[in-house]
Amino acid sequence: MGKFEESDGFKIIYNYFEDREQSPFQFQIKTWKKYASGHCGVVVAPTGFGKTFSVFLGVLIDYLNHPERYKKGLKLLWISPLRSLAKDLAKAMKAAVDQIGLDWEVQVRNGDTPQNVRRQQERLMPDILLTTPETMHLLFSQKKNSRWFTALQCVAVDEWHELLGNKRGVLTELAISRLLTIVPNLKIWGITATIGNLKEAMDVLIPYADKKTVMITAKEKKKIKVVSVLPNEVEVLPWAGHLGKSLSSKIIPIIYENNTTLIFTNTRGQSELWYQIILEAAPELAGQLAIHHGSIDLKLRHWIEDNIAEGNLRAVICTSSLDLGVDFKPVDCIIQIGSAKGVARFIQRAGRSGHSPYEVSKIYFVPTHSLELIEVAALKEALKTGKIEERQPMVLCYDIMVQFLVTLAVGEGFHADEAYKILKQTHAFSYLNEDEFNWGLQFITQGGSTLKAYEEFHKVIKDEDELYKVKSRRISMLHRMNIGAIVSDAMLRVKYMSGGYIGMIEEFFISKLKPKSSFVLAGKTLELVKIKDMTAYVKKSKAKNAVTPSWLGGRLPLSSHLSHYLRIKLADALSPGIRERELKFLHPLISRQSAHSHIPQSNEFLVELIETKEGFHLFMYPFEGRLVHEVISALIAHRISKIKPLTYTIAMNDYGFELLSDQPFPIDENNIENILSKENLMEDVTASINASEMASRKFRDIAVIAGLVVQSRPGSRQNNKSLQSSSGLIFRVLEDNEPQNLLLRQSYTEVFDQQLEEVRLQAAFERISKSKIILKHAKSFTPLSFPIKVDSLRNSMSYESLEKRIERIKKQTLKVN
Amino acid sequence: MTIAAKTVNIQGEVLALTNQRCIYWKAKEALILSDLHIGKTAHFRKNGIPVSSEVLQKDLQRLEQLIHHFNPKSLIIVGDLFHAELNKDVLFFKKWMQQFPDINISLIKGNHDKNSFELYDGLNIDLLDNQLELPPFVFVHDIKTYAVNKFYISGHIHPGVLIKGKGKQRIKLPCYQIIKNKLVLPAFSEFTGLNSNTNIEITRCFAITKTQVFEV
């Protein structure tokens, strides 16, 4: 036994485990050791294996061994992306601390923390504080906040993979960088699930050369069992989005076989729809079935979560709202409806069941059209190889820089060189140059480049000591309200006329409804009465037909990782392996595709030209996800119109896209390679899209984060009406008057990085250019093209007329052949 | 700047709806406009949101050209001449207004026009709290109660219209709306949003662009 294992601290903790008839995992012991030897690092472990107790107990052991090194006050800061996690985590930590016999105080601080507790914390910080990135920045915006952190020993970032890849991650990076200026010896630890770029994840969290770092990976693996729910027979023409409904009879028995089932759908709209479908199929489940998504009243959501934890519910239909969060012990089964869009998300959802170590996670996959079964085969293949998506960290977010500088100015004030250093030493701003930083200073002190046009602007003032400060109380208040990087869509509260709050709904959706029309929310059918003060007043509706809201968010793109496996599995589908149940099942469909058109091999690219009564259709199948297809389809339309001007309608899904025209396409074997060429790619893309309009949409988040737009908070009494404006308006004003504004530039960069996914687009065309292009003509829709066709119909038609229309197309198609 | 206009005949009167967000009423030699929101950019700047004062300059340049073009005797402003408190934008406007000493302003107060003496001091202005009757029209800011036998001209809602083209092309334009016995003006200031949400049957709608007015 080494020296560490003989230390008092280690023995106490080891005994603590023995008392509970457990023994620590190897990765936990390794983390404790590395913590004791002064390392920073990242712990990689699946959920349910006690990753919390790796870092947390590491700090306790160190304290028990060297109490003299610890001062009074905050010792461990625990940053996690989710508020709902904090409460239970604090309880678990508190229990451990008490049992070990320490007098440490463990507390939570976030948006839900009551005023009196906050004031009390500000007088004396607890020994361990659990918080969020946003709350960290709120603390920085308080007067004399440095004093709270002088005793700090360790900052732990939980679920780091959830923060990496978005702007909340940048907020976290900045928070750590600022803390280091107060306590240079701070230890930084991250806790993460497996992602494709773990090394990078660690470098982003701990980019500091003077820190010794280590990555500790748990050997323990979560076993996942994937079962696909197959329909009775395969439809040769997969009917997108509607197949699932007929599968409800197969879902009900699964619910009864298990204690508690979480049913994941991809959008809030779908979850509302499935709630109705399941209740219709099994009315006796009423009262044991709940619906949980981001637009449902927070109190109701908490109530549902509590009831899942207590095992009172049979099934909960949910969206990504339950991807993360507290471990619900009773949950022993997961159903995924429709594509999970990514390997990591699929694993994460599967992991919500069978939570204790060594238990197997069970997940059923319900396809919404038969082609999605290929995705199951692809997911299984991806699970076998163990490769998971990467999360790309964000860099040079000027909106966050601006917000952070004002936060510092509202708090203790800052000197330019200190602030520059804090920014520059993070990964996100390592490429920041002085010109850009000075632009930021000018932006917050003068507003713009022409001084005269911004005379009254005094947001941040540089005083005689060169200290940048916010003097106005009103500006401080407005800024504190605005701290953070989560920008929600404009939402309205939904309330009963008689009182009682149901949830939130997008302004975009409700503005299209007329009073007296009905819609579904939280599983209830409601009739709109009136809209007033950002609130939609409703009453119970008896209507049979109600609209299900489409929330704008939640349309996740297919990850490039998953699409890679999809292409492989589609090629395999003609001769499936004996154990590939899904592919075998799909065989009739695949052979029809093969007979009437072609099944693209992984080194081929399929183009279909189909002529129907409706017109001339061009289908292409890049398998790159809806977002990228949006760009490619516009690009192809642009290139074709150079040969012959045509008007089109465009439709797409995650697998491919359609151009529909009333005239034949001027495409043949001779020019198709040119049309799909990788030459002049970005030039043609820029010419084919309205970049300024896309940038204006991207600018919405940027404007809110940088404090250019004051968010109206539904239900809040302070609505700051005289400061209301839309980001689109500000975007136009800036384009007219301050074209060199970095926030404008950022919006264009974000369009190219995120909307156009430039890197992925380049890679896709690189791949296509190396592929053999197969051009096929057909007289009717093929199994691959049919779901795209149906998807495009759905946008313009009511449900009933859609069903009839699809039946008609199917009949026509089958007759032709 | 192009000034285009479309004339409409309402209650026997000829009104020219211009593409520059105001109406010229020839019989009374009056320019009718709404929602100038003067002081808005300065109000934003004061509260820490940098919006260039160029925005106001451009609005006023446009008004100046309109005045030179139509040569009106009065401006009828159906509310929201000012956005908030007395500030540099307002002072600038007052000074700018001095170049037209003979033009009288009638302001029907809007929800943004505060009851403060200093805002209106020094302007050649008639302040009206609720409405102005100049037969056959009643000028109001926002209509709460209708009389069936009257014709109203108002502002307040900043109307816009969504025009959909092929291939998911959508464009939102400011517009004039005629709803039964009421005409709603677009907001004069370009630093205003467009409200294209409406649950009311619109009788006629005229959209405007930089160069033209056209009925939708």
Image (spheres, rainbow, N blue to C red):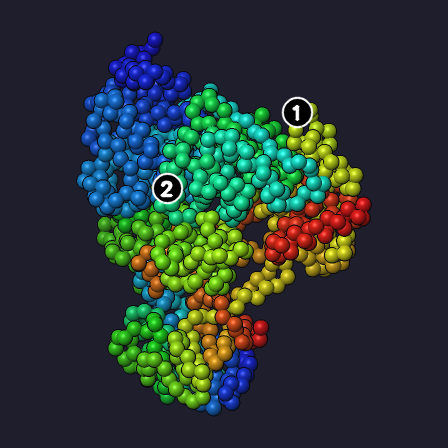
Residue at 43 percent across and 89 percent down: it is B135
Mark earlier in primary sequence (2, 1): 2
Q: Secondary structure at mark 2?
A: helix
**Which amino acid type is marked by label 1?**
Arg
The answer to whether residue A574 is seen in the rendering is: yes
Residue A681 in percent (x, y) is at 64, 47
Instruction: Name the chain under label 1.
Output: A
Could you say which quadrant of the image residue A12 lies in? top left
Quarter placement of the C terminus of chain A: top right
Q: Secondary structure at mark 1?
A: loop
**Mark 2 touches mark 1? (CB < 8 Å):** no
Circle 2 sits on which residue? Answer: A303
Residue B65 in percent (x, y) is at 46, 80
Residue at 46 percent across and 76 percent down: it is B185
Q: With A489 as the anchor, is A472 left or right in this view?
A: left
The answer to whether residue A164 is seen in the rendering is: no
Asked if badge 2 and badge 1 are on a common chain, one would say: yes
Above or below A131: residue A95: above
Residue at 42 percent across and 30 percent down: it is A330
Above or below B175: residue A734: above
Res. B38 mark: none
Res. A579 mark: 1
**Which amino acid type is marked by label 2?**
Trp
Residue A644 in percent (x, y) is at 74, 58
Residue A555 in percent (x, y) is at 53, 46
